[in-house]
Amino acid sequence: MNSELNLRPLAIALAVAATLAAATIVTVATALPAYAAGQEAGAPAEPASKPWLDKSLSSDKRAKLALDAMTQQEKLNWVLGYFGADFVPNKTKKHPAALPFSAGYIPGVPRLGLPALFETDAGLGVATQLSKNPRERTSLPSGLATTATWNRDLAYQGGAMIGREARASGFNVMLAGGVNLLREPRNGRNFEYAGEDPLLAGTMVAQQIKGIQSNNLIATMKHFAVNDQETGRFVLDARLDDTSNRMSDLLAFQFVLEQSNPGSVMCSYNRLNGVYACENDYLLNQVLKKDWGFKGYVMSDWGAVHSTVEAANSGLDQHSGWEFDKSAYFGGALEEAVENGHVPQARLDNMAYRVLWAMFDKGVVDNPVKEGGSIDYDAHKLVSQADAEEGIVLLKNSNSVLPLKAGAKKIVVIGAHSDVGVLAGGGSSLVYPIGGNPVPGIEPTIWPGPVVYHPSSPLKAIKARAGGAKVVYNDGKDTASAAKDAADADVVIVFAEQWVGESLDAVSLSLPNNQDALIAAVAKANPKTVVVLESSGPVLMPWVDQTAAVVQAWYAGSGGGDAIARVLYGEVNPSGHLPTTFPVSESQLPRPKLDGDPKKDRERFTVNYHEGATVGYKWFDAKGLKPLFPFGHGLSYTQFSYSGLAASQKDGKLQLSFKVTNTGAVKGKDVPQVYVSPVGVKWEAPKRLAGWDKVELAPGESKDVSVTVDPRLLAMYDGKSKTWRVASGGYKVLLAHDAGDTKAASITVQLPKQTLNVAGKPTK
């Protein structure tokens, strides 16, 4: 969701404010129907019987009964949403019934016992639009950090936790979770998403959505689709052919839909192959609703609607935050379009029915929300901290400098405001921390800022574990001073950061503000230098060979400082694995230069995704490129070995089994990864991730692991027949520590020819 129009200066204006005219808003506002304020004038009395409130009936039946009891205006009521905060550029005020500084509001139908919808951002927790008195809530680590755990249960628990806080805050719709693939590592919203592989991303986001919806809330799969960079997001035309899309970006969405059944889907800002996503018949009607059988409703992103008739007939069910658009397209204009037949009455009925179905199916009607519920912040912080601990990736560890040893006399901690907190990403997903921002005033202070740190201090947590060591903090602003402090230390820990946010891509993958020079100088002064990275995603590391260890901590959330310290000291054995490839340089990327110009955000341009389905590690494999750190990479303080790889086939699915053994001296968690490579068939890339598991083992302990491979991961999609086709022949199965593992165990299996329908089910 986007709410920047009232929040950020023209200097970073990447939204629609420049094209909105106050005169248009005034005209549209006067054209809104009577139902805009809630109950329409002259509405029929409350019915004596309300069979749609019978919990024993199916969601389909209840939605149909409720729809049949509605007036035309009440049906229209469900398809137009309002922003939950004052909309400064156009001088309009939020709907009076919306929760203050919230993402959105859709009036209910009180006479039928149907509650209003109260919407909140986003995937990391309960966010607040910019306010002097924001809600302070618990923040999960970034989406990439959660995905880096490769732990399905942690993803579910995190979703359940933020869902509890949403319900206690009075919300029944969460605008989460995001699953856009990491095609562009400079994308300012990568921290909200789940990496580059459709199986991993789809599975982890599905678990978060299941957790959210366990609280009787509606979760939102977004941003549909191919919304893979922020620069020019309102105007760019993403070009990607159907076959490639079905095997990459759309496959991730398909996995989420199948595994979690979200109540809503949010269509994105961008065009796809020339057509805006929120009026794209191919995306919304053909793929989402027809091919995949999605039963919920499609909401627009805030400011993503450009028409009435085209959008409604092409599959958009609800116009969100209409104030962000040039007109209330689903207000009076839609009412008129239905009256004159340009939008069929059956289409409006279906739009309202889908919203109602989601409300019944997810328990929104039967479990009304109320603002002011109790929240156990201490317990929730531990949920976030556990997520951060398993998401931290140990990238490098020369001479076992980590975990930090007892007996050190001097430890120097440098940079990134690590004395007071850990960095958060910017934009609509920002969760304001409990206790406030310990580093106020960093630019930008308004959209997509403010720049916020969660007050969980790594320095404080390190001091608590340092024993008798002297712990010195240097802010890192003076390179010479930092190097001088570091020279005689037993160990140096440099915290480096990269802040990005919604509407603002990274200029490059290099660390900003001269941090590369800082790290290089400190490492030259003291080779026992550990670098802790707080970044949205991949960054370049020209200093990597001079440092002793590198720890990827991402945006670590409410308990991030303690999580980092616990990993550094070995209280937690690192078990995170990369959900994205770290390149050596931007020249290795499909697009070495970011498309578009942030200074010309209203000039339409095309992003040609010529790599097709060859995303991330698949691109590196196909081009024979060696990354800095491969997809799936992650070190531990112990070692693991694999043995006994075997394969069988049952019910048309490939099943794999193997043994994992902890051959080291300490307890730890491992992520054995299974990749498949065709022997006689050409795919988009040499191999694909086909499955994984996460296992915890004591020293010397072994566990048997089994993985079932989805047949679509062995197939090529055929657009003409809308089928997935597995070719008969040999397939090499690799049991690896990461995508770059050159010593992976392997076997070759023979698979029969198989055809699956568009939904991935075997054809008869």
Image: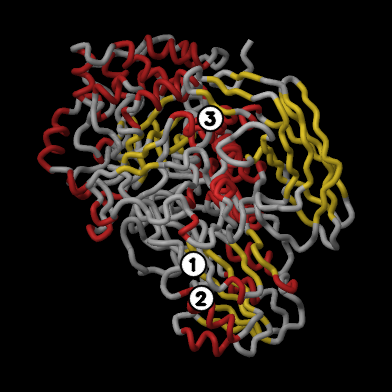
Say few, some or many: other residues with alpha carbon within 10 Å of mark 2 (under 14 / 14 to 19 / 20 or more): many
Q: Which residue of the protein is positioned furthest toward the right in this rendering? A: 700
Rendered image coloring scheme: secondary structure
Name the element at disc 3.
Answer: helix
Does 208 sit left or right of 22 as displayed?
A: right
Q: Position of residue 576 (x, y in %)?
A: 66, 55
Residue bearing the label numbered 3 = 254
Could you tell which of marks 2 and 3 lies nearer the N-terminus? 3
Badge 3 local density, few (<14 within 10 Å), some, or many (20+)? many
Could you tell me the amino acid type at mark 2?
Gly
Query: The disc labelled 1 sits on which kind of residue?
Result: Glu
**Which residue is painted at 69% across and 32% down in the image?**
709
Of label 1 and label 2, which has the lower sequence position? 2
Reading the image, the residue beneath label 2 is: 415
Quadrant location of the N terminus in the rendered image: top left
Disc with the residue nearer the chain's start (3 vs 1): 3
The CA span between labels 1 and 2 is: 9 Å
| Pointers 1 and 2 in contact (C-beta within 8 Å) | yes
Which residue does the image show at 53% across and 83% down from the upper left? Answer: 521
Q: Position of residue 588 (x, y in %)?
A: 50, 56
